[in-house]
């Protein structure tokens, strides 16, 4: 597991009713960026599709982690490592956050970034290409 996944695991097990086994099931069913995007957008339906997650548990996850997943939070710009230093998220996650701050809805920002993202692109390049695609 990556450090970001470990940090997300620790956040998930802090929620009452979720233990290590369920937290691992969540992490095996969804990526870190996708998890934070679902929490940020309060997409409980997306979380319910994960193994072992019911409607009430999904709602509890969203409520308890929403403030940590907001703009500038771990879901957008990285996670804190064990020593408290912020680890930047992937360029695609940063580009999505930038597009959201420009007024694009999360699903549209995801669609645009996924369409233009190529391995090795910087955040700036992804944003530039996504905006070009949005104009077309």
Image (spheres, grey):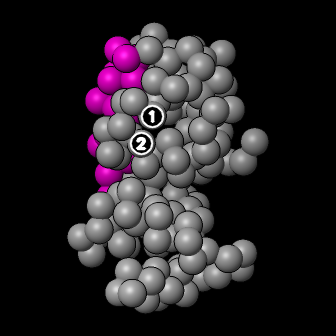
| Identity of the residue drawn at 65% across and 23% down | 25
Quarter of the image that includes the N terminus? top right
Q: Quadrant of residue 30?
A: top right
**Residue that sits furthest to the left in the current view:** 103
* The one of 58 and 3 positioned closer to us in this rendering: 58
Q: Residue furthest right?
A: 1
- Taking the image as shown, residue 33 lies to the left or right of residue 100, namely right
Q: Residue at x 39, y 87 (%)?
A: 136
Task: Tell me where residue 108 sits by quadrant.
Answer: bottom left
Q: Residue at x 35, y 14 (%)?
A: 56
Percent coordinates x, y for residue 32 in the rendering? 57, 46
Marks 2 and 1 close (CB-CB < 8 Å):
yes
Residue 65 drawn in magenta: yes
Stretch in magenta? 55-71
In the rendered image, which residue does mark 1 sit on? Answer: 46
Mark 1: few/some/many CA within 10 Å (<14, 14-19, 20+)? some
Q: Which residue is mark 2?
A: 38
Residue 4, can we see it? yes
């Amino acid at each position: 597991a990556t450090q970001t996944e470990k940090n997300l695991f620790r956040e998930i097990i802090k929620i009452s009713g979720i233990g290590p086994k369920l937290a691992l099931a969540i992490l095996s069913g969804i990526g870190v960026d996708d998890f934070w995007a679902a929490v940020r957008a309060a997409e409980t339906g997306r979380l319910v599709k994960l193994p072992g997650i019911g409607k009430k548990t999904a709602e509890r996850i969203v409520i308890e982690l929403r403030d940590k997943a907001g703009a500038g939070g771990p879901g957008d710009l990285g996670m804190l490592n064990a020593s408290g230093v912020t680890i930047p998220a992937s360029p695609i996650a940063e580009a999505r956050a930038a597009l959201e701050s420009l007024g694009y809805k999360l699903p549209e920002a995801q669609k645009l970034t996924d369409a233009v993202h190529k391995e090795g692109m910087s955040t700036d390049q992804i944003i530039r290409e996504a905006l070009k695609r949005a104009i077309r």
